[in-house]
Image (spheres, grey):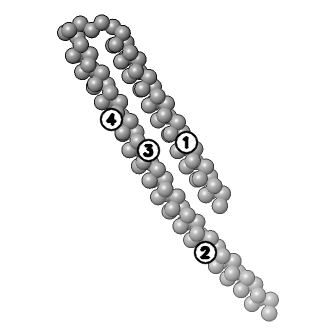
Amino acid sequence: VEARENFARTRSSLGNEIAARSDEVLATLRSELSSAVASDRAAEPSPRRAPAKRQALEATASSNGSFAKSVDAELKQTNKTLTALNKKFDRFDDRVSVEVKDHDHRLRKLERSTRR
């Protein structure tokens, strides 16, 4: 039971930490992208540099979006793995509990038979 509680605490703390870090990364990327867009709008674009800047901003936005998707996919996979491990642990814990009960029952039977 103690191991199950430790596992549950570890699982929840890992999930919270991953979620917090991914939120921080996404917030940082959003702020960098918005500051880049704001600085681009504030500066006077020259006719030659405007398409290059636009392409750079589009590439940055695209890479940020793909990064967010990959982080989301990793979080989903981690959650699936943790859920599967939790199920396996529950089955193991149930099996061990049954074995312990059986062992205790056999010991009581032996103790009763030696008393007679």
83 versus 14 height, above or below = below
Which residue corresponds to mark 3?
75
- The residue where tag 1 is placed is 16
Residue ID at (50%, 39%): 19
Q: Quadrant of the N terminus?
A: bottom right
Residue 110 shown left or right of residue 58 in the figure: right
Q: Secondary structure at mark 4?
A: helix
Q: Is residue 26 left or right of residue 110?
A: left
Q: Which residue is mark 4?
A: 66
Identify the mark nearer the N-term, 2 or 4.
Answer: 4
Q: Is residue 95 left or right of residue 81?
A: right
Question: Compared to 15, does 8 lie above or below?
Answer: below
Q: Residue at horizontal 66%, vertical 76%?
A: 101
Per the model, the C-alpha gap separating discs 1 and 2 is 35 Å
Vertical arrangement, residue 13 with respect to residue 26, above or below: below
Q: CA distance from mark 4 to mark 3?
A: 14 Å
User: Please, what is the three-letter code of the amino acid marked with disc 3?
Assistant: Leu
Instruction: Give the SS element for disc 2.
Output: helix
Q: Kindly identify which residue carries mark 2.
A: 99
- Report helix, strand or loop for mark 1: helix
Type of amino acid at the residue the image marks with label 4: Ser
Q: Position of residue 91 (x, y in %)?
A: 53, 67
The quarter of the picture where residue 28 lies is: top left
Q: CA distance from mark 2 to mark 3?
A: 36 Å
- Tag 1: residue type? Asn
Residue 10 in picture, x, y percent from top left? 58, 48
Vertical side of 21 occupied by 11: above or below: below
Ranked by sequence position, the earlier of labels 4 and 3 is: 4
Please, what secondary structure does the residue beneath circle 3 have?
A: helix
